Image: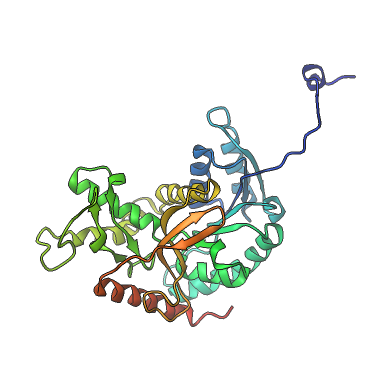
């Protein structure tokens, strides 16, 4: 007896479904799902794979997304706690990991996340040996280094989300002061995604017009407070809502778009900076990088002031103090 589908459709040819822009998100917490929905709304992937060890939450989030397929150009969404579901991904986004417990040191948190990443990365590499990895889990710079070591991928294919969001916050706050949209405000936050980040005041400009004396002793309007506000942003949001999610999700989708569409846009993302700006340690920090279909293709040799270089070196030293204690 013919099925309803058989009566409705006359098949012309058998087709093998091949995902050309497959993206996998590891971790379906608030950050992972913000990344997922941002990628879906931009229409970037033709298949989205979700992985989490919490099967109830995983299935709930996947179903919730799938049920909105009528309203957006929804890709095929697959999900499982088995990493086989991520096979042949172009990009794998890592948002999973342990959260810092009350009274726990940062180093202890890193060690717990290293244990989690060892299993995670071996599975990702097994099923998607040619993928690009975007690391979002915190502390992102140290964990990007860990992922690079564990994956044995070339440095071009291991990317930390780094200061892409910090820079967006920086430009937004500059724009708010000037009454200009953040897209037209140019400025960079480099270094650690954290308290030792570096505001490149020397490069801040609007339409090519350099804003002089910002962040210096002659800055009587105290623009330096904008950088302090950037650093405090995550703490402020976490204090009020318990976590950050939407902005980092949009930031990761922005990086994903540059890679999948081979846009060759410049982003401040975390990459290895040894032998740059006089840094001798094998650490990952955010510097301006060109992103395309092969990951990081180039880094921009940004001209920094001696003071900015000193701050960047200090940022590297801060990370190395933790990193040198790791046992991988």
Query: Which residue is nearer to you in this view: 188 or 34?
Result: 188
For the point 62% across and 68% down, the residue is 151
Query: Which residue occupies the foreground of this view, 290 or 240?
Result: 290
Q: Is residue 238 left or right of residue 179?
A: right
Residue 139 visible in the displayed image: no
Examine the rendered structure and indicate whether residue 191 appears above or below residue 39.
below
For residue 280, above or below residue 91: below
Dividing the picture into quadrants, the one containing residue 164 is bottom left
Q: What residue appears at the point 50 percent right and 46 percent down from the top-left corner?
A: 257
Quarter occupied by the N terminus: top right
Q: Is residue 53 above or below residue 181?
A: below
What residue occupies the far top of the structure in this picture?
7
Q: How many marks?
A: 0
Q: Position of residue 61 (x, y in %)?
A: 57, 43
Q: Nearer the viewer, residue 270 or 204?
A: 204
Quarter of the figure that contains the C terminus: bottom right
Q: Residue 275's spot in the image, x, y percent?
A: 43, 77
Please state the horizontal and vertical placement of residue 40, each as a whole percent of the image: 53, 40
Seen in the picture, residue 260 relative to 117 is either above or below; the reply is: above
Within the image, what quadrant is residue 268 found in?
bottom left
Q: Quadrant of residue 12 in the image?
A: top right
Instruction: Let me know if residue 326 appears in the view.
Output: yes
Question: Which residue is at 58% across, 73% downward?
Answer: 149
Question: In the current view of this chain or complex, which residue is farthest to the right?
Answer: 1
Residue 119 shown left or right of residue 288 in the figure: right
Q: Is residue 270 left or right of residue 60?
A: left
Place of residue 255 in the rendered image (x, y in percent of width and height, measured from the top left) = 47, 51
- 81 left or right of 97? right
């Amino acid at each position: 007896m013919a099925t309803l589908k058989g009566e409705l459709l006359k098949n012309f040819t058998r087709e093998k479904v091949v995902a050309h822009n497959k993206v996998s998100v590891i971790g379906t917490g608030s950050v992972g799902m913000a990344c997922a929905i941002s990628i879906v709304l931009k229409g970037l992937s033709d298949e989205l794979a979700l992985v989490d060890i919490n099967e109830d939450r995983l299935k709930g989030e996947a179903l919730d997304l799938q049920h909105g397929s009528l309203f957006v150009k929804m890709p095929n969404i697959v999900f499982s706690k088995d990493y086989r579901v991520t096979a042949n991904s172009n990009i794998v986004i890592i948002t999973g990991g342990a959260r810092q417990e009350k009274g726990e040191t940062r180093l202890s948190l890193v060690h717990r996340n290293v244990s989690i990443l060892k299993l995670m990365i071996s599975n990702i590499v097994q099923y998607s040996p040619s993928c690009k990895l975007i690391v979002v889990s915190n502390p992102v710079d140290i964990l990007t280094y860990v992922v690079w070591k564990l994956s044995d991928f070339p440095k071009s294919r291991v990317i930390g989300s780094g200061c892409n969001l910090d820079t967006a916050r920086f430009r937004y706050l500059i724009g708010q002061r000037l009454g200009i949209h953040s897209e037209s405000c140019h400025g960079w936050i480099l270094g650690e995604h954290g308290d030792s980040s570096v505001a490149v005041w020397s490069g801040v400009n609007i339409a090519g017009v350099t804003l002089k004396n910002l962040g210096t002793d002659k800055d009587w309007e105290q623009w330096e407070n904008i950088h302090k506000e950037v650093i405090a942003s995550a703490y402020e949001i976490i204090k009020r809502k318990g976590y950050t999610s939407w902005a980092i999700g949009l930031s990761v989708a922005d990086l994903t778009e540059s890679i999948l569409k081979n846009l060759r846009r410049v982003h401040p993302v975390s990459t290895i900076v040894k032998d740059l700006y006089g840094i001798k340690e094998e650490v990952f920090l955010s510097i301006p990088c060109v992103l395309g279909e092969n990951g990081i293709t180039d880094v921009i040799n940004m001209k920094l002031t001696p003071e900015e270089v000193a701050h960047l070196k200090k940022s590297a030293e801060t990370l190395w103090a933790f990193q040198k204690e790791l046992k991988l």
